[in-house]
Amino acid sequence: DTEVTQTPKHLVMGMTNKKSLKCEQHMGHRAMYWYKQKAKKPPELMFVYSYEKLSINESVPSRFSPECPNSSLLNLHLHALQPEDSALYLCASSQDGPVLREQDEQFFGPGTRLTVL
Amino acid sequence: DAKTTQPPSMDCAEGRAANLPCNHSTISGNEYVYWYRQIHSQGPQYIIHGLKNNETNEMASLIITEDRKSSTLILPHATLRDTAVYYCIVPRGGGKLIFGQGTELSVKP
């Protein structure tokens, strides 16, 4: 199984809602990532988890809260988002951690398309 | 961190080779060059990576110049399904992928 799955595929939420995005992989990967991609822009790294511990936070606002409950699952909790947070949210995983080797390719999921009204 | 420069767009005829260039003149000796692509509305897909030597896999070939300041991704027989944005990336320490603007490749019949 070389797949990263993300749910839901689409999400529409209001600015006062609380929602969560879910990512799952069963490749035994120990590093997992969240990226944000605005329309016609490249993906931007948000968070990196290595061995279930947050290792990189790219100065992401606190209204985005990541969680890694186990080595196969990665969540992104959303609260009090703004319309400008509407984007495609991509999850990825790679084989190694906690010292990430440059040789490790990242496997990406299909993304969750989020719309904040 | 090594920056990369790619042309914003390229066209290629179906069945012909697509040669996508990338400039990474500030690359350091132990940094790899990675290529990913993103087909519309999908997640990025790893293609190939290399350090010094040329590399080939079932998807593509990667040619790295001797001074390592530039590289070329070659899709030997482009198909319509190869239409995508292609990203050349030199990962930061720790494997962080910083995506540039990439090259939008259009394969035309």
Image: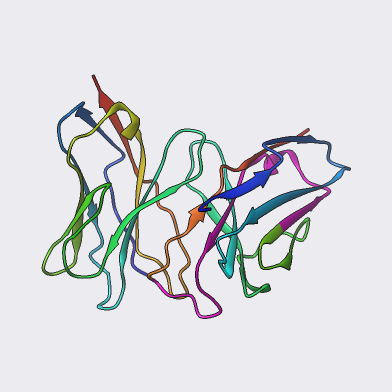
Q: Nearer the viewer, residue B20 or B59?
A: B59
Q: Report the side of A39 relative to A114 (left or right).
A: left
Residue B38 belongs to the span the image colors magenta: no
Horizontal side, residue A28 vs residue B99: left or right: right
Q: Residue furthest bottom?
A: A99
- Could you tell me which quadrant the N terminus of chain B lies in? bottom left
Residue displayed at 88% across by 43% down: A16
Q: Is residue B67 above or below residue A80?
A: below
Please state which of residues A11 and B2 is positioned toward the viewer in this rendering.
Answer: A11
Across and down, in percent, residue A56 comes to 60, 71
Q: Is residue A88 magenta?
A: yes
The magenta-colored residue range is A75-102
- Where residue B100 appears, as percent x and y from the top left, is 40, 52
Q: Residue farthest to the front?
A: A1
Q: Is residue B10 left or right of residue A39?
A: left
Residue lying at 42% horizontally and 70% vertically, measured from the top left: B92
Viewport quadrant of the C terminus of chain B = top left
Based on the displayed image, in which of its 4 quarters is residue B91 positioned? bottom left
Kindly give the residue lying farthest to the left in the view shown.
B66
With respect to residue A69, does A37 lie above or below?
above
Number of numbered labels in the structure image = 0
